[in-house]
Image (cartoon, rainbow, N blue to C red):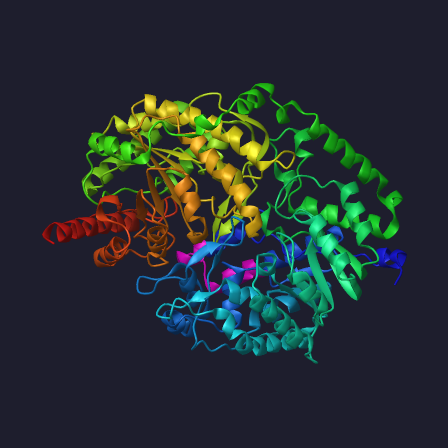
Amino acid sequence: MTAKSAAAAARATVYGYPRQGQSRELKKAIEGYWKGRVDADALRATATELRAVNWRQLAEAGIHEVPTGDFSYYDHVLDTSVMVGAIPERHRAAVEADALDGYFAMARGTQDAAPLEMTKWFDTNYHYLVPELGPDTVFTADSTKQVTELKEALALGLSARPVLVGPVTYLLLAKPAPGVAADFDPLTLLDRLLPVYAQVLADLRTAGAEWVQLDEPALVQDRTPAELNAAARAYRDLGGLTERPKLLVASYFDRLGDALPVLAKAPVEGLALDFTEAAAANLDALAAVGGLPGRRLVAGVVNGRNIWVNDLEKSLATLGTLLGLADRVDVAASCSLLHVPLDATAERDIEPQILRWLAFARQKTAEIVTLAKGLGGGTDTIAAELAANRADLASRAGSALTHDPAVRARTAAVTATDARRSQPYPERVAAQRAHLRLPLLPTTTIGSFPQTAELRTARADLRAGRIDSAGYEERIRAEIGEVISFQEKTGLDVLVHGEAERNDMVQYFAEQLTGYLATQHGWVQSYGTRYVRPPILAGDISRPEAMTVRWTAYAQSLTTKPVKGMLTGPVTMLAWSFVRDDQPLADTARQVALALRDEVNDLETAGTSVIQVDEPALRETLPLRACDHPEYLAWATEAFRLTTAGVRPDTQIHTHMCYAEFGDIVQAIDDLDADVISLEAARSHMQVARELAGHGYPREAGPGVYDIHSPRVPSTEEAAALLRTGLKAIPAERLWVNPDCGLKTRAWPETRASLENLVTAARTVRAELSAS
């Protein structure tokens, strides 16, 4: 096929779409089901309608082939575990008794059975549920969900492509099941898993699928020869099936590297590549293997992870270069649109010209359709769209919001000394222990306490004008008083004010910093029914006034115990925002760090002796390729130190991280030079404590003993057992006792019971240490 005919054949598609609905209908239906207010049939009806709405909108916008199977009640990796029959033994009876309740039990746990471990989906803020596998795992095909959703789309008269997590990525994401040797490699199960995928593919072909997409994002990471050989074997076998749909193997988030020749040689009909994050690398590698003659290339040229308008002319140039490298070039976003909000036109509080800089899922869909039209029919067919796009890009580049000379001058003046504490840790720790006088195994929480319906109502009333600022602040003061009183009665050693005034740990700060934009409807799924509204980091950052000092100082006035000041760190402020793409991330991080440094110093001046700067995103933002790690970790750790280094030696700096794989950033954790770090550890059975010990981490640490992402209440003995495990790796004088994460999403009854058990466990283990 000639380049001209390849262009004429261009089609528009997407890999996935936001699940929640315009008003988060899915979240409301699922949580209603959990609370018994919505029955299973009503929940399923809501889900069916949301899928149909999404597909109709995509088709009406001009998408030629809609995705199916990407919808999920909780997580698409958990859906894959169900599809292949990888049900943990502790949940098998629940799944057999009721598939829907058993599904949610795997996600959330029950009082008698812990949930699956949860961690970040590559370098995004989406969380997936980690498959648990072992040498005795028996896979069985259950294609019910995938076939049902395909048939729903076909019944609407649409061209549809089922999307599945690929078998290699699924196994590479898995971990050994509890009781299985830690060195067990789930990838050894590939030959056992492939027949199950073959059955699912056959079922989808019978149901009417022409194409099936198999997502293999794990192949953009560094992979061993054995892992690449497994990928080659997987797609040789699946491609060699006689009764199957056409196969589109998709990768995203980075360059394929050594995996691209492997997939290019595989007997599959198409590849989907990311041409935003790694445009030059993937394009050069594709040309080096001779392209994809006779096959389909889906080119991800619209950024599926950020919200800025696409540079249409730049994308068209990339697409034009790709013509001739494949039999058919189609246009898509770089990854599923799950990672962006639904519709920018719903935002009424953003200035109209600035709003034109933004593209959420619906706007990205329009960009994809425009690019496909331009690729197929020439630029004359999209002349008006190109002119408007040029004007939008110029407006953003020339805006005063994106360039503040004072901020840039301050950032340029930073020196290495600004990012170093005045004394080394051994000297600081002595001063801190003398000042704080904490017991062995000090107890604390991570920061937030339950955000009750009353608090959310108060915030809504303030926005609607039903109460004034004075009335709202009185409600917040009352909540802080209750939280402090509860912590004192429970016996916690280092208290928090509970963050009653905060809507979100990033958005709260973004709304008080220059350069940020806040949305009203920009919801993005983080995990399950947890949705966040990432702010938009649009311009240069500064702090006009103190953000947290008065609430922390008020809490401290209610108690003689230390109250932690609570801030979100600079890397997390970037990672959980939609970050600007017009300057290096390191420059933006330094701007945010300087704004937060002012807040840290003001907290200390106001009498705060313990200040926690949370960096849960440090690991998730780690580049997917090892060769890119050093540069990132250098500026990321410097930004944290720049935030915290200006305090006195006797001020104790904490940080917190959760739900990530920490083993490969232990040196970076050390380089933060925080005095205390708290980490998620309950679901992973104190794995991080062993990793810290293996590194020789010299500071204090609190590996969590209470899994806050499950409604179950850990018993005193369960928490004590985890503490004893932690003590095998971390000396008692350096071990803290705390939950895995903040308590914002939990209800008060379970929070009270869990923290009471946590404090009792700490006292029990203290007594054991004293007696030994």
Judge from the rendering whether residue 599 lies leftward or rightward of residue 755; answer left or right: right
Left or right of 653? Residue 633 is right
Give x and y (percent) for residue 651: 30, 29
Determine whether 340 is above or below 570 in the image: below
Query: What residue is rendered at 28% in x and 32% in y?
Result: 427
Quadrant of the image occupied by residue 612: top left
Q: Can residue 530 be seen in this view?
A: yes
Above or below residue 321? Residue 463 is: above
Residue 153 in view here = no
Residue 4 percent location from the top left of the image: 89, 56
Residue 356 in the image: x percent, y percent? Answer: 69, 34
- Is 184 displayed left or right of 540 in the figure? left
Residue 57: say if magenta: no
Q: Mainly helix, strand or loop, the magenta region?
A: helix
- Is 448 placed left or right of 627 in the picture? left
Picture quarter containing residue 113? Answer: bottom left
Q: How many marks?
A: 0
Which segment is the magenta one?
Answer: 31-48
- Tell me the residue at 44%/58% (across/down): 33
| Front residue of this view, candidates 303 and 555 | 303
As drawn, the residue found furthest toward the left would be: 771
Residue 33: say if magenta.
Answer: yes
> Closer to the camera, 615 or 62?
615
> Residue farthest to the bottom?
242
Residue 752 on image: x %, y %: 26, 47
Picture residue at 53% right of the left edge, 51% below the top:
25
Which part of the image, by quadrant, shows the N terminus?
A: bottom right
Single out the residue that lies furthest toward the top.
406
Foreground residue, 68 or 275?
A: 275
Q: Quadrant of the C terminus?
A: bottom left
